[in-house]
Image (spheres, helix red, strand yellow):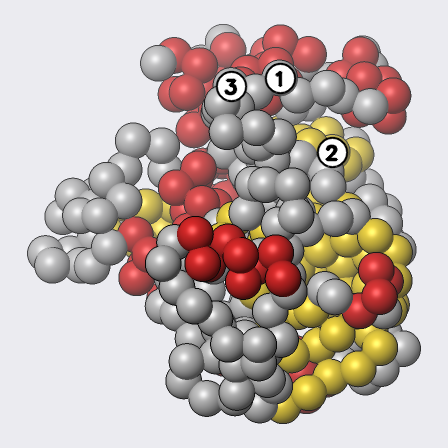
Amino acid sequence: MMKQMRIARWIMLLALAATAALSLPAQANTWPLPANGSRLVGENRFHLVENDGGSLEAIAKKYNVGFLALLQANPGVDPYVPRAGSVLTIPLQTLLPDVPRQGIVINLSELRLYWFQPGKSEVTIYPIGIGQLGGDTLTPTMVTRVSDKRANPTWTPTANIRARYKAQGVDLPAVVPAGPNNPMGHHAIRLAAHGGVYLIHGTNADFGIGMRVSSGCIRLRDSDIATLFRQVTPGTPVNIINAPVKASVEPDGTRLVEVHQPLSKSINDDPKTQPLVLNASMESFKSAAETDAALMEEVIAVRSGMPVDVTQHEAAAVQSM
């Protein structure tokens, strides 16, 4: 409990600082790119749950964040009937992935898509659904490009997908026509890698964004894919990574770390406690004299999915309060 209280205090302080320092987004979840040397964008918000305020999924949709991201940022909240009067943290603040800021960047662990539109000094962040746990339904990491895009696409399910549906008592046709029964929604963007079998597409469902629900493709809310579809052109670079831990040394020396639950590898894995192996860069960040290593361990344990300040001298100041 004490650990969670300390992390919550850090998150609140960082959120308040961000609210004062950052401008409002130009549009929904579109933020100006940070200053040189910084990776911090966005600002967290807070939502007061009213009577009959709806499910966590409805609140996630209102702020255009993912379901699991909202759940991780608010541990203990009832996902079906959040308690009226409670205040939820809306996790809109994040560290940009440590990759080139161009085209489409997808971080599977955080279930987010980053869109760096050419010619604009901004980034739009979309929550996504990705492949389910299973041998042929995982969404792979890759460096590729957009090869094609289609409005009102048909869906040609693979033999494995049809067999999986068949086992559940559903007979899929060889080709599902465009329309309300097409799970790809109204727009699809095809990726060149792996023979073009992976797409970024919409959905005809009201749930599943910010979760592992697809057959391997990347799923967006239908309004989001409509916007992305208009802006993306064939040849746009796409970089899909899997980085549950992100860190940044900001220009003022503040050291931030953001930890997401890792993707399960088997049905028995618990992403809340599954071990996180830090790469050499993260180990170096943690062992630096300027980092409060003990606090970083707590951040790794809590896995809130939000940036937390782990600077050594600031941690000592909070401990003395």
Nearer to the camera, 43 or 114: 114
The answer to whether 146 appears left or right of 130 in the picture is right
User: Quadrant of the image for the C terminus?
Assistant: top left
State the residue position of label 3.
Answer: 273
Nearer to the camera, 203 or 75: 203
Q: Check residue 102 in the rendering and tell me which mark sits there, or answer none.
A: none
Q: Is residue 96 above or below residue 293?
A: below
How busy is the neighbourhood of tag 2: few (under 14 within 10 Å), some, or many (20 plus)?
Answer: many
State the residue position of label 1.
Answer: 275
How busy is the neighbourhood of tag 1: few (under 14 within 10 Å), some, or many (20 plus)?
Answer: few
Image point (82%, 74%), residue name: 146
Q: x, y percentage for residue 49? A: 21, 52
Instruction: Examine the rendering and report whether any part of residue 321 can be seen.
Output: yes
Q: Check residue 247 in the rendering and tell me which mark sits there, or answer none.
A: 2
Nearer to the camera, 121 or 171: 171
Q: x, y percentage for residue 112? A: 61, 55
Q: Is residue 234 above or below residue 134?
A: below
Image point (62%, 50%), residue name: 137
- Which is nearer the N-term, disc 3 or disc 2? 2
Q: Amino acid at mark 1?
A: Pro
Q: Depth-wise, is mark 3 or mark 2 nearer the camera?
A: 3
Image point (44%, 37%), residue name: 72
Q: x, y percentage for residue 239? A: 82, 57
Image point (73%, 41%), residue name: 242
- For the residues marked 1 and 3, what is the alpha-carbon distance in whole angstroms? 6 Å
Q: Are marks 1 and 3 in contact (CB under 8 Å)?
A: yes
Q: Amino acid at mark 3?
A: Thr
Q: Quadrant of residue 233?
A: bottom right
